[in-house]
Image (cartoon, rainbow, N blue to C red):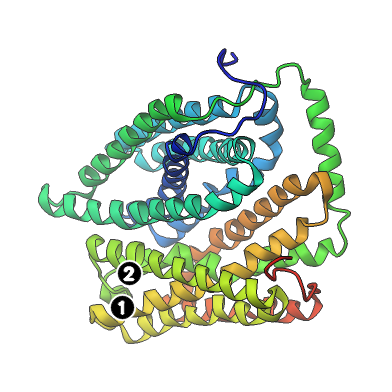
Amino acid sequence: MTDKNENPMKTAPKESSIWAWIPSLYFTMGIPYIVVMSVSVAMYANLGLSNTQIALYTSYLNIPWVIKPVWSPIVVALKTKRWWIFTTQLIMGAAFALVAYFIQSDSFIALTLSGLALVAFSSATHDIAADGIYMDALTEEKQSFYVGIRSSFYRVAMIAGQGGLVWLSGYLYHHNGGNYFNAWTMVFAGVSVYLILAGIYHIWSLPRIEQSNSDVSLKTVFEDFYKTFITFFKIDNIGIHISVLLLFRLGEAQLVKIAQPFLFDDIANGGLALTNEKVGIFYGTIGVIMLTVGGILGGVIVSRDGLKKWFFPMILAINIPNSMYFLLAYFTPQSNFLIGGAIALEQFGYGFGFTAYMMYMIYIARNSGKYKTAHFAFTTGFMALGMTLPGMISGWLQEMMGYSNFFLWVLLCMLPMVILYKFVFIDPDFGKKGD
């Protein structure tokens, strides 16, 4: 059903109306993703799952973001992007409510994973529509101006989720009878309420700038998708490009699934035995802030010197700081300063190095003409796949190796990308300001 008041012509929203939806939209975009991919890791660690189970199950939840380009034509062809946004937000709110309810079940693992899978598919769909309405509602000039705003509120969502919600779970645990099942039930119920309220708010606040493409047949849409798919794999050096997308974060893809369980685990098992409150502060708050600072610095440097000059140093930057976890596992310090500092350094390196990865994705799609946006979406799918596959086996590897050896293995996982770098060609001028 098409919104009757929507204008088929693209108009320029008033400045005040833009501020009414961009911050809330991208904060809301970040919450379900970070809850599904990171907060759920903390929850399952608290609820007694093994690292093998945690890594495997939560990696499966990443699949919707891997394959979302496949159903993006449906989002474009059916209904309006505005409709998809508030509908998926309401669905995610309902799904989080189910997760909260299922936590108390004897079969909580299978049932909560089912609820989180529904959130993941809805969130991936929401991402397509949100980025689409951003491009449709704003001129190119305003898109450039507000890109920092949307990124900032997405980062705030990461802090609120990875930091705030994990901290809150610990607070509720210690002030409500020492029961993690009850604590996480309340946390997910709160997330549910937020998503439902966000959906209701965005029914009112999102711009009405389009009509649904109900006159476009799905056959035509999927024919265009097929052409897009074929042209993507005809890009020069696409084999090298895909290899970079899959290997650039090979170590980080495994580390991210084990970092929180390691911080939570008992000292007798090789962990650091941190409370949820400390993990929320060190990993979810200070860590995300340092990740953001690293990303900003990386962007400034690449815009000054170009991607080629910094590509190899950024490969090292995203990998070498992983050694901080090896040192933490080897020495098991109890100093909050040392633990927080090590996590901050690793996250800063990740944010700095990830700049090269994002720029490389843009580099792949830059000369694709009318397929540029679609080809970039394909690169995001490979980016997600590069996190999913290694993440699936990371828990099994850790339990087989122990924490110290596992983190050493993660550090060595930089070698395939270091070797592949010799075969990567990047235009020396790409990424420089004004390029």
SS class of the residue under badge 1?
helix
Give the label on residue 339, or none: 1
SS class of the residue under badge 2?
helix
- Kind of residue sitting beneath label 2: Leu
* Whether residue 292 can be seen here: yes
Task: Mark 2 vs mark 1: give the one in front.
Answer: 1
Expressed as whole percent of the image width and height from the top left, the position of residue 38 reads 42, 55
Indicate the quadrant where residue 388 lies: bottom right
Expressed as whole percent of the image width and height from the top left, the position of residue 3 reads 56, 16
Distance between the Cα atoms at labels 2 and 1?
9 Å
Q: Is residue 422 left or right of residue 411?
A: right
Query: CB under 8 Å between callouts 2 and 1?
Result: yes
Give the label on residue 263, or none: 2
Q: Nearer the viewer, residue 323 or 425?
A: 425
Expressed as whole percent of the image width and height from the top left, the position of residue 149 reads 47, 52
User: Which of the two labelled residues, at mark 2 and mark 1, occupies the earlier sequence position?
Assistant: 2
Quarter of the image with the N terminus in it: top right
